[in-house]
Image: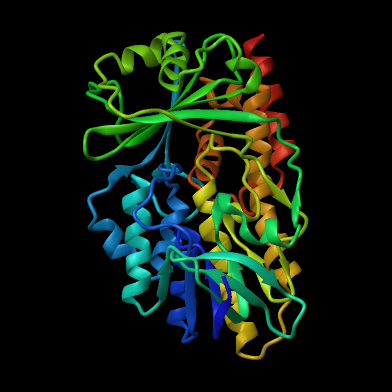
Amino acid sequence: MPITDMQSRTVVVIGAGPAGAIAAALLNRKGHDVLIIERQAFPRFSIGESLLSHCLDFVEEAGMLDAVQAAGFQFKNGAAFACGDQYSAFDFGEGFSQGKPSTFQVQRADFDQLLADQAALQGVEIRYLQEIVSADFNAAQPVLQVRREDGSQYALQAGFVLDASGYGRVLPRLLDLEAPSDFPLRRAVFTHVEDHIQSPPFDRNKILVSVHPEHRDVWFWTIPFSNGRCSQGVVASAERFKDKPEDLDACLRAFIDETPSLRNTLKDAVWDTPARTIGGYAANVKTLHGPGFALLGNAAEFLDPVFSSGVTIAMRSASMAANLLDQQLRGEQVDWENDFAIPLKRGVDTFRAYVEGWYDGSFQDVIFFKDSQPEIRAMISSILAGYAWDLRNPFVSEPKRRLRMLTEICAGEAS
């Protein structure tokens, strides 16, 4: 289809999910002209439903906290872990870092719609069902080619582009920025159920992470919502799926049947929604920024869903990029590498250390250790709450060394 017109905007944000809505709202609040291009129609399904406390700092910064608190989402005050008879719960209100003591567990279709609507109410224009099909960053200003739902196209010149396209990874694909992840290939199978979970002992105010009794690298999430439903998923390497049914519902149930504690928790659940799957989700890029653009959240890098860090990293990157871009648009000299990429990666690498420790079993030993000191639990709780950039926390400033030290202590006490 021919390009029918050329338009121009100061900032173009690709994607209306949490990172895009937060970044656009922050820039709009600072007086900049912002347009969001979103490929899908909202509301739309997404996983990443258990928010960390740090997320609410950015929701508040964007002027959306009152709306989120009034929406009736499930209150969340921590994370619980189960493996056989072992159970360990962390309360975000007892953390080391100064931050929010609680957050929410959300059905992302509703949550993402709410944030996008809030950005629009503040004055951000959002164009749904439009897709970026090419990007030229060789001119003085970036030019994006946009395709509308009817197939017609137009050119969109931007002063700057923020890619918040999530798994779509628009600019990494179009600009050949994708890089292989060093994380092993894993797959998730998940659904929503009417859970009928009896409480107690189940705590609806926490995400429950259950570990398979025989395979420590296989784990499950159980995320309760405020409407009596929950998100239920399993994550495992491709090898673990070989003896499971191809049918996704049967596959998920087979994993759960092998895990007695979780099977008992879900014994009255109504399995009324077809399961879905996503695989090979770990991703990386060659750079987080370039002349005229920056990458936010999952468009840049995604680690693993085990600690629900994805939305937190997305929102943190949105806040950092929006505030730095505001300075640039006001004529100040900025350093995207030292003021955006390096400090953002610092927190991502903290999460990475504990994700790696989870799968090799060392962090699981720490989580289930019965005699851990309250101060150490508080520091770990803060990381689980999303405060992975708080360098005052020794388990943030030296994650690998501190985790190794803790693992040795746990092993020594157990022997």
Q: Is residue 289 visible?
A: yes
Is 139 situated above or below 89? below
Number of marks drawn: 0
Look at the image and name its color scheme. Answer: rainbow
Q: Looking at the image, can residue 389 be seen?
A: no
Classify residue 64 by image quadrant: bottom left
Q: Quadrant of the N terminus?
A: bottom right
In this view, the residue farthest toward the front is: 1
Q: Quadrant of residue 141?
A: bottom right
On screen, residue 17 versus residue 74, left or right, reads right
Residue 383, position in %: x, y? 55, 44
Q: Is residue 372 above or below residue 318?
A: above
Q: In front: 255, or 374?
A: 255
Q: Nearer the viewer, residue 172 or 328?
A: 172
Q: Residue at coordinates 49% horizontally, 84% vertically from top-left?
A: 33
Q: Residue furthest bottom?
A: 331
Q: Residue at x 69, y 54 (%)?
A: 346
Q: Position of residue 347 (x, y in %)?
A: 64, 52
Q: Residue at x 29, y 20 (%)?
A: 201
Residue 359 in percent (x, y) is at 64, 26
Q: Is the C terminus in the top left, top right, bottom left or bottom right quadrant? A: top right
Q: Residue drawn at (29%, 44%), measured in percent from left and top?
A: 75
Residue 194, image x, y percentages: 25, 28
Front residue of 169/40: it is 40
Depicted 400 relative to depicted 20: above or below:
above
